[in-house]
Image: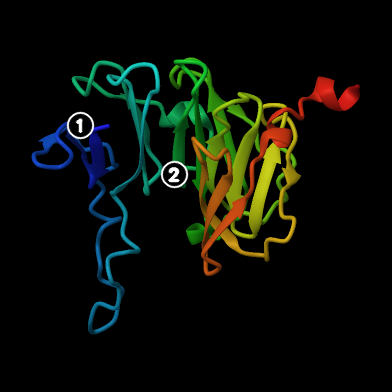
Amino acid sequence: PRTLYFGGNHVFKSVDRGDSWVIYSPDVSDNDPEKTRRVTGGLTSDTTGAENHGTVITIAESAFASDVVWAGTDDGNVQVTRDGGASWTDVTANIGMPQDTWISRVETSNFEPGTAYVSGDGHRAADFTPYIYKTTDYGETWTNISAGIPDGQSVYVVKEDPKNPDLLYAGTEFGIFYTINGGMSWNPLQRNLPVVAVHDIVVHPRENDLVIGTHGRGIWIMDDIWALQQATEDVLGS
């Protein structure tokens, strides 16, 4: 509970709730100067810096071993360390997403130590394809598990349910989806939620509520999702 991470082009780590920090990784971005230039061709620069690449956007520590940490960047890189930051492996090329796709989220599994999920958001490059991938071997191989999410819905977050490993949630530009079969097919979970971008998803550890953070509609809560967690294919088939 005392461990914190944050990212620039490196991953930084604190084990004392932020009183002190160490550099936990090398530069895990492309470190491409062409991507970080702020000149736009006019007489003055009209970019704020938010459009520039080379930043760690998402960090995820394994639930099984604190030495296993994943990092994803806004210039398309996914890297993982399995030895507490001593060495990092770039697994980007193994995934199969288009080059430079913004890595919107890395999510580690609560059930399998080598399992992780990655979502990608390409809308800044006019690519609105939903990208969600899963690995079970620390990033050596990946499977595209986004079938069923309509084209045109960029994915901002993917989350694994803490009680059912086959139940996943995905937040997109236009709402929220779920799958009960590990990503083989997805269905909308919109209910009374307006059409809105969903940027974060949490299952409350005590109340078992599904809590989502949106862009423009605040925080929404689906109360006690026990029925959804038990809605396996076998249960529905019976």
The earlier-in-sequence mark between 1 and 2 is 1
Tag 1: residue type?
Answer: Ser
Q: In the structure shown, which secondary structural element does the residue marked by tag 1 occupy?
A: loop
Say left or right for 80 vs 177.
Answer: left
52 or 62: nearer the viewer: 62
Q: Give the number of the disc on residue 25.
A: 1
Q: In x, y percent, where is residue 28?
A: 27, 36
Q: Give the number of the disc on residue 229.
A: none
How far separated are the C-alphas under marks 1 and 2?
17 Å
User: Which residue matches tag 2?
Assistant: 103
Q: Residue furthest bottom?
A: 43
Above or below: residue 92 compared with residue 7: above
Label 1 neighbour load within 10 Å: few <14, some 14-19, many 20+: many
Q: In x, y percent, where is residue 166?
A: 66, 25
Quadrant, the C terminus: top right
Residue 60, by quadrant, is: top left
Residue 42, by quadrant, is: bottom left
